[in-house]
Image (cartoon, rainbow, N blue to C red):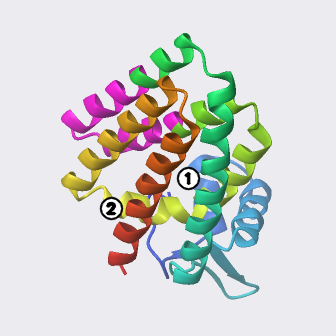
Amino acid sequence: MITRGILKPKQTLSDIKIATALNISKSPVREAFKRLEQDELIKIMPQSKTFILPINQEKIDGACKLREAIELLLVSEAINYVTEEDLLILDSIIDKQQQAVDRNNKEEYHQYDNAFHHKIAKISKLLDAWNILEKVNIYMNRIRYLSTDRDSLIGLSIKEHRQIVVAMKEKSKAKAKREMSSHLTRTRKALKKLF
């Protein structure tokens, strides 16, 4: 809910209210709060309040750079292993992403966007790198959900995904890396405009 922008920066959280709403004890809620604090999404002030931290531009910049480095490695390695079936799956994911856009379903759009990048990681056989990306994406996702209000950016992202797949079909590492870099650079620039 934090990364999707449902819960806003500086909004306070109550472990008691959340536990009651979920019909669970406070212990699992407090454990979840500790993890969110470790991820620097919330601040726990003992005996006072817990609140959602503002979006940190420095964290976003660092996350974008790290994401680009990892994604370029993943797409380059994926070309060594990609099969026709993998390419069909990537095309199908992009089609589903477009259908989500056509239905104005932002949640589904993001799920398929994530599925596209995850599939490339699976093809590359470097899933440990994907695990690092999931941590990095905690920061990125807070901004990504804000940026989906811009229809032209969404359409461009889908077009860029298709260009990445074309490069993979051609088994061109240089082109795939160039297309991925272009995609991520454009995304980073669009995100910066939101601040």
Q: CA separation, marks 2 and 1?
A: 30 Å
Residue 166: percent from left, percent from top = 41, 29
Q: Which residues are magenta?
A: 92-116
Residue at image point 55% right, 52% down? 21
Q: Which mark is residue 147?
A: 2
Q: What residue is pinned by disc 1? A: 21
Residue at image point 46% right, 15% down? 88
Q: Secondary structure at mark 1?
A: helix
Image position of 141 (left or right of 26):
left
Q: Secondary structure at mark 2?
A: helix
**For residue 85, above or below residue 7:** above
Image position of 48 (left or right of 113):
right
Residue 79: percent from left, percent from top = 62, 30
Neighbour tally class for label 2: few under 14, some 14-19, many 20 plus, Cα within 10 Å: some
The quarter of the rendered structure image containing the C terminus is bottom left
* Residue 168 shown in magenta: no
Say what amino acid the circle numbered 1 marks.
Answer: Ala
Residue 6 seen by the camera: no
Q: Residue furthest top?
A: 85
**For residue 58, above or below residue 179:** below
**For residue 120, above or below residue 142:** above
Residue 53 seen by the camera: yes
